[in-house]
Image (cartoon, rainbow, N blue to C red):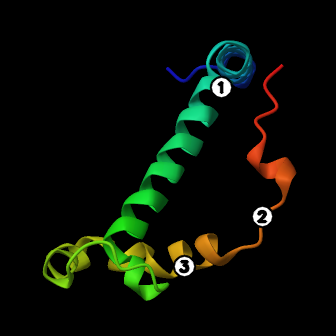
């Protein structure tokens, strides 16, 4: 016995409504915290790569032996790291506008 199209349509609408309510609750409660954590993780990743592979930019910090051992783990993100480190920044980017 197949459900009628109207029952299927109502069930689909209820699912989409529940999903929308869930997204609203997520946005109202923890979205900002998740974004802040993602930004902080990006900063820490950039700092780690700077410490390990700073010699690519002319900042020798670690001996090359340790950098070479970590190279296979960092190769996928080196190009984006170089672009993010060399990107020109503004004073407004440094200020955190949490009010």
Residue found at x 68% / y 26%? 32
Residue found at x 51% / y 82%? 79
**Disc 3/disc 1 C-alpha distance (Å):** 28 Å
The residue carrying mark 3 is: 82
Q: Give whichever of 95, 20 is nearer the camera.
A: 95
Percent across and percent down for residue 75 are 34, 80
Is 90 on the left or on the right of 7, as rendered?
A: right
Mark earlier in primary sequence (3, 2): 3
The numbered disc on residue 77 is none
Percent across and percent down for residue 39 are 59, 44
Q: Is residue 92 above or below residue 18?
A: below
Mark earlier in primary sequence (3, 1): 1
Percent across and percent down for residue 45 are 43, 56
Is 42 on the left or on the right of 53, as rendered?
A: right
Q: Which label lies toward us, 3 or 1?
A: 3
The residue carrying mark 1 is: 31
Q: Is residue 25 above or below residue 73?
A: above
**Disc 1/disc 2 C-alpha distance (Å):** 25 Å
Q: Give whichever of 76, 69 is nearer the camera.
A: 69
- The crowding category of the residue bearing disc 1, from other C-alpha atoms within 10 Å (few below 14, some 14 to 19, many at least 20), is some
Considering the numbered disc 3 on the image, is that residue within a helix, a strand or a loop?
helix
Q: Are marks 3 and 2 in contact (CB under 8 Å)?
A: no
**Disc 3/disc 2 C-alpha distance (Å):** 14 Å
- The crowding category of the residue bearing disc 3, from other C-alpha atoms within 10 Å (few below 14, some 14 to 19, many at least 20), is some
The residue carrying mark 2 is: 89
Count of numbered circles on the image: 3
Mark earlier in primary sequence (1, 2): 1
Q: Is residue 60 above or below residue 91?
A: below
Q: Which label lies toward us, 3 or 2?
A: 2
- The crowding category of the residue bearing disc 2, from other C-alpha atoms within 10 Å (few below 14, some 14 to 19, many at least 20), is few
Q: Is residue 59 above or below residue 93?
A: below
């Amino acid at each position: 016995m197949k459900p009628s199209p109207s029952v299927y349509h109502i069930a689909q609408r209820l699912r989409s409504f529940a999903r929308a309510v869930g997204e609203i609750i997520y946005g109202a409660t923890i979205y900002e915290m998740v974004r802040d954590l993602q930004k902080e993780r990006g900063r820490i990743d950039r700092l780690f790569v700077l410490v390990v592979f700073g010699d690519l930019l002319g900042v020798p910090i670690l001996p090359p032996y340790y950098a070479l051992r970590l190279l296979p783990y960092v190769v996928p993100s080196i190009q984006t790291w170089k672009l993010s480190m060399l990107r020109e920044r503004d004073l407004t980017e440094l200020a955190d506008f949490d009010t």
